[in-house]
Amino acid sequence: MELARTGPGEGSTPPRARLNSSAPRQSLNGTWEFRLDQGEWTTIPVPSHWVLEGHGKPAYTNVRYPFAIDPPHPPDENPIGDYRLTFDAADAFLDGAVLRFDGIESAAEIRLNGQLLGTTRGSRLTHEFAADLRATGNVLEVRVAQFSDASYLEDQDMWWLPGIFRDVDLVATPAGGLRDVFAVADFDPGARTGTVTIRTSAPARLRIPELGVDRDVHDSVVPVGTVDPWSAETPRLYAATVSTDVEEISLRLGFRRVEVRDSVLTLNGNPIQFRGVNRHEHHPERGRVVSLADARAELELMKRHHVNAVRTSHYPPAPGFLDLTDELGFYVILECDLETHGFVEVGWRGNPSDDPAWQGAYLDRMQRTVHRDKNHASVVIWSLGNESGTGTNLEAMAAWTRAFDPSRLIHYEHDWASTYVDLYSRMYASHEEVKQIGEEVLTPPPFDATPAELHRRALPFIQCEYAHAMGNGPGGLEEYQDLFDRYPRLAGGFIWEWVEHGLAVTTDGRREIRYGGDFGEDVHDGNFVTDGLVSADREVRPGLTALAHWYAPVRIEVTGSTIRIRNRYDHRDLGHVTFRWRTESADGVLDVPPAAPGRTVEVPLPPRASGPLVTVEAVADDEHVLGSGQLTRFAPTARPAPTTLPDRAAFDPASMRLRTLGGLALDGPMVSLWRAPTDNDRYPGWDEPDLPPYAERWTEAGIDRLRTRLVSADEVDGALRTVHRSAPPGRDFAVDSEFRWHQVSPDALLLDVVVTPRGPWPVEWARLGLDLVVPGAPAGLDWSGLGPGPAYPDLAAGVRYGSWHAEAAELSTPYVRPQESGARRGVRSAVVTTSAGQLRVTVVGEDEIAVTVSPWSRALIASTLHHHELVADGRTYVSLDLAQSGVGTAACGPGVLQRYRLPARLARVSLLLEASAV
Ligand code: IPT
């Protein structure tokens, strides 16, 4: 098997559109014979990856190639899988048929009845081979190499998963049928009319019943009169057929026009904003074998979280995906299967992107990408690939694409000069830089600007990747969204990334989620593969809840007297939305004039909407909440009186820590400044590349193991006063905490706290908290504050004030690698229930705290590598935080913004603590 070439595969028929045809099709999916490396024949399901079917192991690398950079040669250690299927073919396939492969990683040699049909290159690209079949006993043999020359072009940040992993079909190609159709349905925003520009491989009949179209076409421009346009918000599709005497193709036409106007991205004449995500195909058990049902569920989950755009990072998805995005309404950046990122490790030396020997392969990849999906309304942008440096082969891809399909825009991120693309695109640019890019087009260009600069200035800007959703995060979403909303040039962006690529392994009935290195790989990038808004099982992570708030189509602000409602749709008014308000004792519906796209309307707050908390919600016909806002007018919590001196016996005599309350044997509070590092804490932010990550700064300063000394204990103003000094070992900077204890009732203590930093603090804190250990396993938390989910200072959207309950399992987020999680913010009172009793905390006055309840200590969380390895010790760890640091997105991008950091500072709070034992 020749695996060290630089060209495309050979022998396939030219790429064409995926057509929904009346011609017969037979799926060849099912059980095939299989052997690895000439071993024993066995069987395997097709589609699948052999490493997930018990033959070898998956392996994960991000940027690095797991083999030497010696293009075009694959390594000697190169698993080869042989597949064999014997099948009968119905009559319909005997007069012309193709064998169609939608995905084989990474290179294949195809034989039918002993004859070599050809080879494939391009794992996520469709290849078809003309097949001369007999009625019975056809033998299809496919030899697949895990690594090949193609691997150099397929260095995406994901698992290496070889095999025939997408559908295999037999497709009839009847004589007199249609080999290909290319239809562009254009919408003229001025006249509000549509035009279908259609090219067919043979003369055919075009019918669009709803529009009264019934005419001959071949290479034709068909005006269709007034139409309703397609957009992600209004995914209007018109059924059409293109037919000859022997074959009928069904199309769904969405009329739309994507255009750049003065550096503004528009659709159908209206500026649009991508509220997008990057989507890889991933399933925890099946890898990149993702069913259409799974894809639909994913898209519906995105819709519910107000996502309107998908970048198919970094390859074309299984073809049915585009039918769904047309129908459900998503803008798609369809990306070619191309990434040569590993060459960055050698300064891009030898990068195939700039080597003419590879040009055929590059063009072939782009042509297969564009042809297959060219009839989809949802595809508004073609992307040349990801992280492949720059070079003439990329330019050639762009030139071919522009000539073939002028109806769409061309994207490629790494062309920073933007010479061959239609969008200025960057990834993980800081807020400051995004602002500058938004602003630069508001003033005239410098008089000496080069033509290339002038071209770039004329382009809209997108962040094809931003806000890296790894672990607890991403912080900073609000600030990005503010910029996108403020500057017309900024057309939004795509979060990295939608789904975590954790792989599930079930041993002894226990299902565990694994990441890089867990399969014995000697070169790997650990848990960098689990960085999604949803887990591999599509559980919503808190980042998605926050994102949904910023992506929501309706923004509601409630002030003392008015409700301000902003329509953030680009194409539709709010006629379909009901606005409801409620307080604890009343509710009603608002009479809101239907605001046009981008407009704000104001209505008065109804007089009956009085009281401490008013919630207003925008609700769609299907009860889906499209936006919400709240007004809070909480009265300060009264300070209990009268009080007496507490009984000293309730305190440990040496440390003066509280040991018992209401019969519950608790321990605390202890001042704490540290958190179990999040994924973001473990990387240096792009804004501070020369500083160690926070996780290291914290351990270096020693705040993960504070030592506490009792400074004094006395009685003052009827209270027991204890003063404690907490400081890292070997350091002379400290925090002093003064606790004044008052007995309110036998089971209740009032605690006034003042925490004062001492000495020059060399590092910002993770949090400023009071920690208590309560006996018994956690059984739940009730609180009034923000909920229902967790929140951090820069990730505090999508939560609202109310009275909430969380079950024990909801108290922390099961991130694949354990880390700080689960804080409930804005808390005014809380009840922690454990198997041993209850601890009630009420904040006196108008302060709010954050409450974290966990079955694991922070030290345990920080030292455990997988969620399933956490072992609870039967106690409950409670943190009452007076302040917290934000989470940022340093794992890839800027760290915590200055305003969300927590420099050493003085803090006070008064708490009422009540407890009872079971
Ligand atoms: C960026 C990649 O494009 C993406 O595939 C993913 O690897 C992401 O990083 C990190 O998760 S590239 C990087 C240099 C920003």
Image: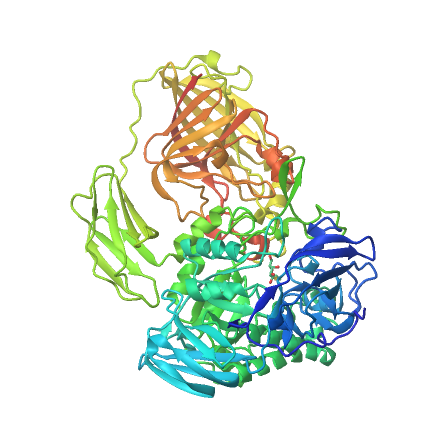
Viewer-nearest residue: 414 or 617: 617
Q: Is residue 366 visible?
A: yes
Residue 349 on image: x %, y %? 74, 71
* Residue 203 as seen in the image, left or right of residue 697: left
Going by the image, does 241 lie left or right of 42? left
Query: How many labels were placed on the picture?
Result: 0
Comparing 765 with 414, the one in front is 414
Indicate the colouring scheme. rainbow
Q: Position of residue 455 (x, y in %)?
A: 50, 81
Picture coordinates of residue 45 (x, y %)? 67, 54
Q: Nearer the viewer, residue 801 or 89?
A: 89
Asked if 851 appears above or below 257 in the picture, the reply is above
Q: Is residue 58 visible?
A: no
In the picture, residue 216 is in which quadrant? Answer: bottom left
Residue at the left extreme? 607
Image coords of residue 9 (percent x, y): 71, 74
- Left or right side of 240 for 174: right
Pick the quarter of the image with the C terminus.
Answer: top left
In the image, what residue occupies the spot 40% across and 55% down? 550
Q: Quadrant of ligand 1?
A: bottom right
Residue 136 or residue 908, whichever sits in front: 136
The quadrant in which the N terminus is found is bottom right
